């Protein structure tokens, strides 16, 4: 199928998807990250399966419809309207396709001073913000995952992430 990786950075997820047969569009704001991503895809032998596009994910957004739209960690010190980006992401999911969103649930347990203002949507809050048309989407996953996290100074703690996997129900026209 086709996949869109939003905020793809240096392309690890896009390359992984392409190595499993997906045709992928990787989108990121950083031209440097995209150049590195293209190099990683070429090294992995999947350069012909990935298109790299520079977008600010607000003022511009990739065109098209995709079987999978993946948005991971759209929390950044750069100004970004998460709600608008995630609504655009949902709009880019083809009927029968999947929207996968992973966001930090908060700062790491050892973080005493937030380094920047960030939006940490709740499990129910993100679904409410998306305002997906009733009857057109199914929530397949809505959970929190906790993992170990160590500070740069070696302080052990944890980090929690929220995970949503939403399926856009197939629409049949007779």
Image (cartoon, grey):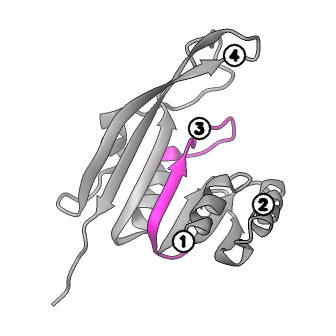
Report the side of 22 relative to 90 (left or right). Answer: right
Please name the residue that numbered disc 2 is placed on.
40
Distance from disc 2 to disc 3, alpha carbons, whole Å, reads 24 Å
Q: Nearer the viewer, mark 3 or mark 4?
A: 4
Q: Is residue 28 above or below residue 170?
A: above
Distance from disc 4 to disc 1, alpha carbons, whole Å, reads 35 Å
Pick the front one: 19 or 38 = 19
Distance from disc 3 to disc 1, alpha carbons, whole Å, reads 26 Å
Please name the residue that numbered disc 4 is placed on.
151
Q: Is residue 59 visible?
A: no
Count of marks placed on residues = 4
Label whose residue precedes the other's in the sequence (2 or 1): 1
Label whose residue precedes the other's in the sequence (3 or 1): 1
Q: Which residues are magenta?
A: 59-83
Q: Residue at x 47, y 28 (%)?
A: 105
Dot 1 alpha-carbon crowd within 10 angstroms: few under 14, some 14 to 19, many 20 or more: many
Dot 4 alpha-carbon crowd within 10 angstroms: few under 14, some 14 to 19, many 20 or more: few
Dot 3 alpha-carbon crowd within 10 angstroms: few under 14, some 14 to 19, many 20 or more: some
Please name the residue that numbered disc 3 is placed on.
75
Label 3 secondary element: loop
Q: Main secondary structure of the magenta part?
A: loop
Asked whether 80 falls inside the magenta stretch, the response is yes
Label whose residue precedes the other's in the sequence (2 or 3): 2
Percent coordinates x, y for residue 14 in the rendering: 62, 61
Distance from disc 3 to disc 4, alpha carbons, whole Å, reads 18 Å
The reply to whether dot 2 and dot 3 touch (C-beta < 8 Å) is: no
Label whose residue precedes the other's in the sequence (2 or 4): 2
Please name the residue that numbered disc 1 is placed on.
22
Report the side of 16 relative to 30 (left or right). Answer: left
Q: Is residue 118 visible?
A: yes
Q: Nearer the viewer, mark 2 or mark 3?
A: 2
């Amino acid at each position: 199928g086709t996949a869109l990786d939003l905020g793809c950075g240096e392309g690890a997820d896009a390359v992984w998807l392409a190595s499993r047969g997906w045709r992928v569009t990787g989108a990121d704001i950083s031209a440097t990250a995209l150049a590195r991503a293209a190099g990683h895809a070429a090294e992995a032998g999947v350069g012909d399966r990935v298109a790299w596009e520079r977008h600010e994910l607000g003022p511009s957004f990739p065109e098209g419809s995709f079987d999978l739209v993946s948005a991971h960690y759209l929390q950044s010190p750069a100004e970004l309207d998460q709600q608008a980006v995630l609504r655009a992401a949902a709009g880019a999911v083809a009927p029968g396709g999947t929207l996968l969103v992973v966001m930090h649930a908060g700062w790491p347990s050892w973080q005493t001073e937030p380094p920047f203002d960030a939006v940490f949507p709740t499990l129910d809050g993100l679904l409410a913000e998306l305002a997906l048309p009733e009857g057109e989407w199914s929530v397949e996953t809505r959970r929190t995952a906790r993992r170990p996290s160590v500070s740069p100074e070696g302080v052990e703690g944890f980090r929690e992430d929220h995970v949503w996997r939403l399926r856009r129900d197939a629409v049949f026209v007779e």
